[in-house]
Image: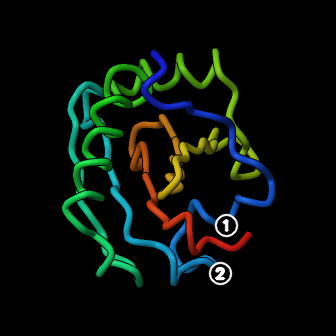
Amino acid sequence: MKADYQVEAALPKQGELFYSDSSQEGNCIGHLRGDFGHGGDEFWTSWWPHAAEQKKTADFQREFNKLVSFLRKDLLKSRRDMARYLREHPGYPLAEGDSGTVGYTVTNSTYLFCIRCTPTPGNYDFYVYAYLMEEEKQ
């Protein structure tokens, strides 16, 4: 991926931020849930609001859309491309066993984005949680 955003493996202390109802729920604007469809090359998403949804400003929406567009060039391009990305850029394992679920983060001065990836047919392939950085307390 080019340098628009720095995608990094999550830290162990961030593990709960990749799921709803984390201890930081008050700082969570919402999350995007998505999958690549039956064939693995589609892009289906839905937005889920969280406690800080009132912070879903026009600036946030522009930043979030820019991030997702960036991620769609590689990590969120398709299920096959996601699996390749996970092999080439190991993320933090979020689940025990064979689920292959890993987490990455992207941060800037305002937001923390937590990207949960599970490139397995029959599951949602990704979630992107958005948190306010200035209030995020880890």
**Percent position of residue 80, x then y:** 42, 19
* Side of 107 where 28 appears, left or right: left
SS at mark 1 in the image = helix
Residue 67 point in image, percent of width and height:
35, 39
Which residue position is annotated with label 1? 16
**Residue at image x 38%, y 31%?**
71
Looking at the image, which residue is at 76% across and 51% down?
96
The circle drawn on residue 23 is: 2
Q: In the image, residue 53 lies at what x, y percent?
A: 32, 78
Residue 70, by quadrant, is top left
Query: Along the horizontal axis of the image, is 81 left or right of 135?
Result: left
Question: Would you call the spot at circle 2 few (<14 residues within 10 Å), some (14-19), or many (20 or more)?
Answer: few
SS class of the residue under badge 2? loop
Q: Is residue 7 left or right of residue 69?
A: right
Is label 1 in contact with label 2 (beta carbons under 8 Å)? yes
Nearest to the observer: residue 8 or residue 20: 8
